[in-house]
Amino acid sequence: MSALVHPFAETGGEPFINVVRAEGSSVWDDTGKEYVDGMANLWLCQVGHGRQEIHDAVTAQMADVSGYNIFSPFTNPRADELADKIADLSPFDQPGVFLACSGSEAIDTAIKFARTHFQRGGDPDRQVIVRRTHGYHGTNVGGTSVQGIEANREMWGDLVPHVIEVAHDDLESAARTFSEHGEHIAAVISEPVQGAGGVHPPPLGYLEGLRRLCDDHGALLIADEVICGFGRTGGWFASDTYGVKPDMITFAKGVTSGYLPLSGVILSNRINEALRDHDFLLRHGYTYSGHPAACAAALANIEIIERDGLVERAHHVGRRISGGLDALTRDGVIAGSRGVGALWAADIGRDALPLKQPLLDRGAILRPIRDAVAFCPPLSTPDAQIDRLVDALASAIEATRGSR
Ligand SMILES: Cc1ncc(COP(=O)(O)O)c(C=O)c1O
């Protein structure tokens, strides 16, 4: 057995699939078997695999400067260019952009920024972060504390204090929390569309309601767009798709399509101005914040998304998936479906985990989550490959019917 400790893996491991090649919306293992990548790696590869332009941009950058930090007094042209580009694409007017490496780092950054906003603003008792059931916000200590997937919070000892949970689909639950604790709430953290928790689009009016509660009680709204950002929901950000402007947006994944690790937090002008006030040393940051090669990958990736119209194409991909799932629903194969843009889930109506291996056997990488199977392919995926994913799901369900 290899020395490698795998994330989210059972002790003892399983026979791992050795991925040795990736091109477009397919990956191949070391036996030559092809899989359609219906999860875009892990909810992130918007442009598909093997894009030469991104390789070239990274190689050219590495020939100039392979890596250098941006702690004061340093910066680099790619990091500045990327921050400006993301600011332009964001729903904010003159925001700030903080760069990190992983979604988990972006989340812990946003939590710290929300709290320091009030620590420095003369309201130090405002520390509570409100989380939603089913929310997933990464696995650093902050993100573990504010995620609503209970099993992920267990067995790590004490987590970050001052966190309150509300029901993911019930605004009343949030309203009650605000009426009891309003003056202590620093921020609500919410994925606009919950991803890893099972692909749950927000109930009608839910995000607007959260925004209103935050405004009425002086709290901040953090939109975790680590999955939703960079086109996945059919807008550059889901905050555009749903027309609800948060105070901070966390992003990762789709910003580079995973070619290199990069993440960050977009700060509304108000939060940014307060944070960059005079006489304040921001004691937060990562060695690899603004890594020039990762920034070059992000810039090339965003250029492809723009050039190929992939934000708009998310709607087409989504219609193809949902059309397929509607047909399976009509035929009684699945119980229904839910989603937005190119982020969908089939409701299997029973435990979906037994479908994991049959799906892989059929060359389909999809993600069973409780009673659902998630679809999140590259935004460039051709129709024929989407159809293969839907067919594989139908066939895997058929093959496991007896094992209900
Ligand atoms: C919504 C959301 N937030 C945060 C994270 C954590 O990102 P990372 O795994 O890059 O740390 C994820 C990862 O899937 C995510 O889906």
Image (cartoon, rainbow, N blue to C red):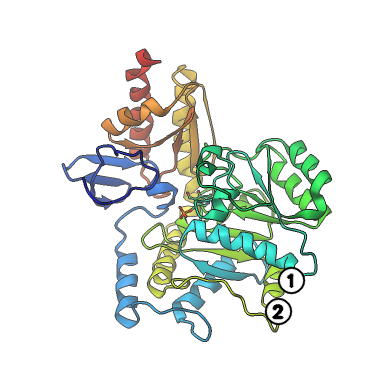
Q: Is residue 224 above or below residue 166?
A: below
Rendered image: mark on residue 120: 1
Residue kind at label 1, given as amino acid type: Arg
Tell me, yes or no, if residue 372 can be seen here: yes
Residue at point 61%, 59% (across, down): 249
**Number of marks present in the image shown:** 2
- Residue nearer the viewer, 21 or 6: 6
Placement of the N terminus among the 4 image quadrants:
top left
Q: Is residue 303 left or right of residue 136?
A: left
Q: Is residue 244 left or right of residue 46?
A: right
Tell me, yes or no, if residue 235 can be seen here: no
- Residue, disc 2: 277
Q: Is residue 342 left or right of residue 239?
A: left
- Residue 41 percent coordinates (x, y): 37, 48
Circle 1: element type? helix
Residue at point 39%, 55% (across, down): 47
Q: Callout 2 environment at 10 Å: few (<14), some (14 to 19), or many (20+)?
A: few
- Residue 313 percent coordinates (x, y): 47, 49
